[in-house]
Image (cartoon, helix red, strand yellow):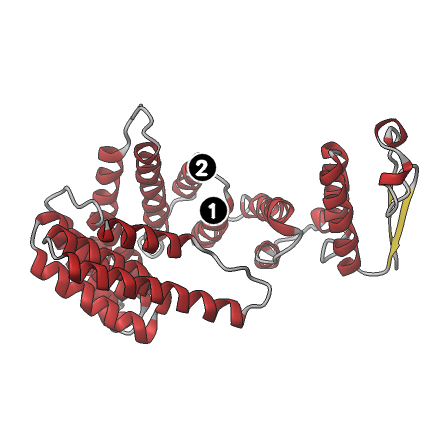
Amino acid sequence: MSTTIRVRFLTARCLHTTSTLKKFNPTNLLLRISSSLNVRNVAKTVVEYCRRVGWLRISLLVGSTSLIAAAPTHEWWRVVGDDVDRLIARAEQSFGGEMLGRAYREMALRRALQVAERMEGEEKVEVLSKIFTRLANLQADLYGTERVCREGVQLMQEAGPTTKNRHLVEGMRTQLAVTWLNQDRARERRNLSPGTSHTHQAVRLLRDAACVLETSAEENLNNGTPSRKLLLQLANTLQSLGRQFQYDDAERSLQSALLIYQHIYGLAHHTTINVLDDMGCLYNRQGDYDRAISCYRRAAELGEAHAPWLVSAILRNLGSTLVAMNDKSGARDTFLMALHAALHWQRLLVSENSDLEPNATEENYCRNLLDSVKK
């Protein structure tokens, strides 16, 4: 069945002359489209045109109309039943560009949340964890992420988590704590007034979560039923805690996280390599440059073989450590290697994904550091 979208531009002739509207009829635009793909393509063209000529409200109207018309399932927002996995799967689809795609996915997840509210017990906690983890990742700013994480923690607590799925609640608390830390870092980078600092509160939350997860992991091991998901959540929480280099338990936390990741993933995994890089940053902050360089070089060596997208940042950290040691020549060579690694990864990424455009952010970081050493 064809889909019909009718958009009337009532004030078009008052705003623009007919010469600017060669592509569309501004009085009565009638699009009859046979598939949701055509809806998206045509609506995207209309939206871009309306934005270009300054019709922002009409752009939003066309976009939201096409969002509903091109939904993968007819009248998906009216679907009844308890098929939460299907609703969550819809939220995974890339649809309508960044702004409209985010709105579509969030609506699908909110619909799944309505269904999840009728559930009980362990199943409800697991579904809430899936929903709020995805909702948090969809937010456009840190304050939206904080709001979603708070809501998720509250609803998951009310659902009555058991020992089996307690790690899901602690995972959401970890995400909330990391969001608070990122908010404080963002204010520092912009030289804004600190306001209410959440750093100490976030660290306390991370320590509490790590304590609960460690206890649960020990109980599972004693019962002969180790949980991979629980151990991974424990490692993630410990890594987040270890990144707060100013605290005394940072090194122990990173070492514990490294042991868990090595046990589950081995060394040839980007998560393990990330922890090695974090340990290098910790030792660099402590002034233990030899151990920092050892960690960085090990991470870069593993990254070249298994995680090339991490190599440039690791080499930048290594170069900064060499600058602190007053080894300007070594730092210059390292920054140059970091630049080459960034360019290599961008070329590889774009060649494998023709729809992507090169991202020069990492390249600019490397060039700025290289210029600073040369000066």
Residue 299 x/y as whole percent: 23, 67
Q: Is residue 330 left or right of residue 41?
A: left
Nearer to the camera, 21 or 68: 21
Name which of mark 1 and mark 2 comes first in the sequence.
Answer: 1
One can see residue 352 in this view: yes
Residue drawn where x is 13% and y is 48% of the image? 285
- Callout 1 amino acid: Phe
Q: Farthest residue toward the front? A: 375
Tell me the quarter of the picture where residue 322 sits.
bottom left
In space, the residues marked 1 and 2 are separated at their CA atoms by: 8 Å
Tell me the quarter of the picture where residue 49 sits.
top right
Question: Which residue, given by chain and number where applicable, does mark 1 sit on?
Answer: 132
Nearer to the camera, 363 or 151: 363
Question: Which residue, given by chain and number where applicable, does mark 2 sit on?
Answer: 151
| Residue 169 versus residue 308 in the image, above or below | above
Q: Are circles 1 and 2 on residues that touch, CB within 8 Å?
A: yes
Residue 150 x/y as whole percent: 41, 36
| Residue 19 versus residue 350 in the image, above or below | above
Residue drawn where x is 13% and y is 59% of the image? 292
Q: Secondary structure at mark 2?
A: helix
| Residue 107 versus residue 95 in the image, above or below | above
Residue drawn where x is 88% and y is 33% of the image? 17
Q: Secondary structure at mark 1?
A: helix
- Callout 2 amino acid: Glu
Nearer to the camera, 300 or 160: 300
One can see residue 224 in this view: no
Q: Is residue 116 left or right of residue 344?
A: right
Tell me the quarter of the picture where residue 252 sits.
bottom left
Nearer to the camera, 21 or 101: 21
Q: Please give the label number shown on residue 52.
A: none
